[in-house]
Image (cartoon, grey):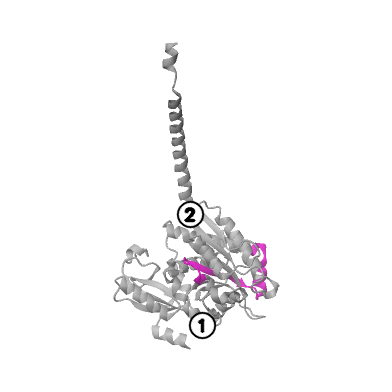
Amino acid sequence: MELNRKNKIHPLKTTGIYVFVCFIIVLTFSAFTGQDVEKQENKFVVVLDAGHGGKDSGNTGSGFKEKDIALKVVLQVGKELEKNPNIKVIYTRKTDKFIDLFVRGKIANKANADLFVSVHCNAHRAGSSAHGTETFVLGTHRNETNFNVAKKENSVIFMEDDYEKNYNGFDPNSPESVMSILLSQEEYLDQSIMLASAIQKKFTYDLKRKNRGVKQAGFIVLHQTVMPSVLVELGFLTYKQEGQYLNSKKGQNQISTAITDAILDYKAKLDGNVETIYENNITEDVVDTNGISYKIQIAASSNALETKPYNFNGLNNISRVKEGNLYKYFYGNTSNYEESKVLEEQARKKGYGSCFVVAFKDGEKIDLAKALKSQAN
């Protein structure tokens, strides 16, 4: 009887052991949960924006609806990207629904997105043979064609309630109003151009589409975002042959694959897993209608340096051209001379006191005065 009392475990001791075991289980579960949350937070967030929707059909050239084509392509891109466990996809719309432009930007900003990709279809006058793909980043541009493309897309705000309040009096029909919105995305311009160049590269080389280049214009939907952002014009619905392609399942599959691959290439570049997308002067697609672009020459060397920020005092968007026995290095890329002066000042602040603006036409270096005269005409 005495022996049994000695071997008997006290109830309080049993309770203590139980509490301790539960505590360990909770800690273990919390650790795993914390890791899962951290994984979610570390995902690369892509916001996909299908242009137009609902009461806004977009352009309807040759009987095709821009809003439908944009949505189908976006959903396919999202489906492919979601197969990557390191990517989180958010849609501004997944159905035929009208979404205010400022709301699209809010969705991206709230998600703290890494990328914003808006998909559209282009249009020209009836009977026009204009065709091909072009991808826009936000930027100043005096070119009338680019202004008209932006004006057409920006005019959607007139369908919104309280648009004057939501956009602080922004007027899509006013060039001055467009110019006023452009400085907000300056810090993301290089990365936006990187993605836009990757998309155009896929369209041009993989799909053999006519390359209309990477361009700059004042799209209000891009202005609303605070991350690298692009607006893709898949092609012209007013050109019946291209409209039929864009409206076909084959065309949409090919286009969505190209955009998906470009986004993955862009992410890989940021992760440092592949060589620079800017090799072979891809960024020289950022041209005006005369084929002119501007870069800042910052250095010349007999050595072929990697175009990485650590080799150029932290500057991104470096391209390299070999001339004779020398490699020349250029910073930035813009189709607007005024913007090139801003880039020049940035390079000077990074220690390149003798840098200067260089003009290119269709990828070939030309006299600066000749380029300015050509743009003035």
In this view, the residue in front, 152 or 25, is 25
Determine the residue positioned at 35% across, 73% down. 346
In the rendered picture of this protein, how many numbered marks are placed on residues? Answer: 2
| Element marked by disc 1 | helix
Task: Give yes or no for residue 74 being in the magenta stretch.
Answer: no
Determine the residue positioned at 48% across, 76% down. 181
Most distant residue in the top direction: 1
**Residue kind at label 2, given as amino acid type:** Lys
**Residue kind at label 1, given as amino acid type:** Pro
Determine the residue positioned at 42% across, 81% down. 337
Residue 279 percent coordinates (x, y): 43, 66
Residue 207 percent coordinates (x, y): 58, 65
Q: Which residues are magenta?
A: 222-251
| Element marked by disc 2 | loop
Task: Give yes or no for residue 225 being in the magenta stretch.
Answer: yes
Q: On the picture, is 279 further left or further right than 240?
A: left
Res. 230 in view? yes
Image quadrant where residue 256 sits:
bottom right
Image quadrant where residue 129 sits:
bottom right
Q: Which residue is mark 1?
A: 175
Res. 274 in view? no
Contact (Cβ within 8 Å) of mark 2 with mark 1: no
Task: Report the disc number at residue 348.
Answer: none
In this view, the residue in front, 132 or 156, is 156
Residue 287 percent coordinates (x, y): 48, 77
Q: Quadrant of the N terminus?
A: top left
Q: Which residue is mark 2?
A: 43
Q: Is residue 141 above or below residue 77?
A: below
Q: CA distance from mark 2 to mark 1?
A: 38 Å
| For marks 2 and 1 on the same chain, the one whose residue lies earlier in the sequence | 2
Mark 2 crowd level (few <14, some 14–19, many ≥20, 10 Å Cα): some
Residue 251 percent coordinates (x, y): 63, 64
